Amino acid sequence: MNDGVISRVIYCGHSRLAVMKDGVILRVIYCGHSRLSVMNDGVILRVIFCGHSRLAVMSSGDIIRVVCCGHSRLPAMNGGVILRAIYCGHSRLSEMNDGAIFSVIYCGHIRILVKTIDYF
């Protein structure tokens, strides 16, 4: 990644992540039971339903409420900053500071590359 742009599609197990440009996911991601809504200017347009996971609607880069759904839990965000690390089953999300994920996320068969620059 460079300047917040994912340069290519990521294939990892059953996961597929669409190419991003200038912080905008260009198309919907369909990956197993996962669905990620199209993003525009850093705003997730609708709720994501992914197996037992549910991600609240975002506005202006802020997750509006904590997600508690099955084994998944995502802490509240303030100003685009995830306040603490998430440990949930096999999922681990590194702490964010100023919109940057500092390390690779390993979650079952899913791997997300390091993000270095905030695109919200």
Image (cartoon, rainbow, N blue to C red):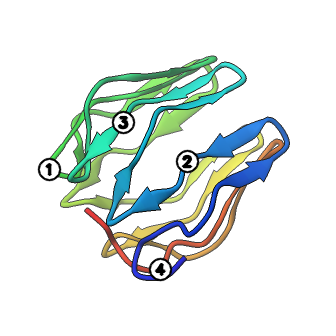
Disc number at residue 60?
Answer: 1
> Type of residue at label 3?
Val
Left or right: where does residue 51 sit relative to residue 102?
A: right
Residue ID for mark 3: 38
* C-alpha gap between disc 3 and disc 2: 10 Å
Q: In which quarter of the image is residue 50?
A: top right
Mark 4 surroundings: few (<14), some (14-19) or many (≥20) residues within 10 A: some
Horizontal and vertical percent position of residue 32: 72, 23
Q: Where is residue 35 in the image (x, y as percent from the top left)?
A: 53, 25
Task: Name the disc covering residue 116, or none.
Answer: 4
State yes or no: discs 3 and 2 in contact (Cβ < 8 Å): no
* Mark 2 lies on residue: 18
Judge from the rendering whether residue 20 lies leftward or rightward of residue 38; answer left or right. right
Mark 3 or 4, closer to the camera: 3
Name of the residue lying farthest toward the left: 60
Amino acid identity at mark 4: Thr
Q: Earlier in the sequence, mark 3 or mark 1?
A: 3
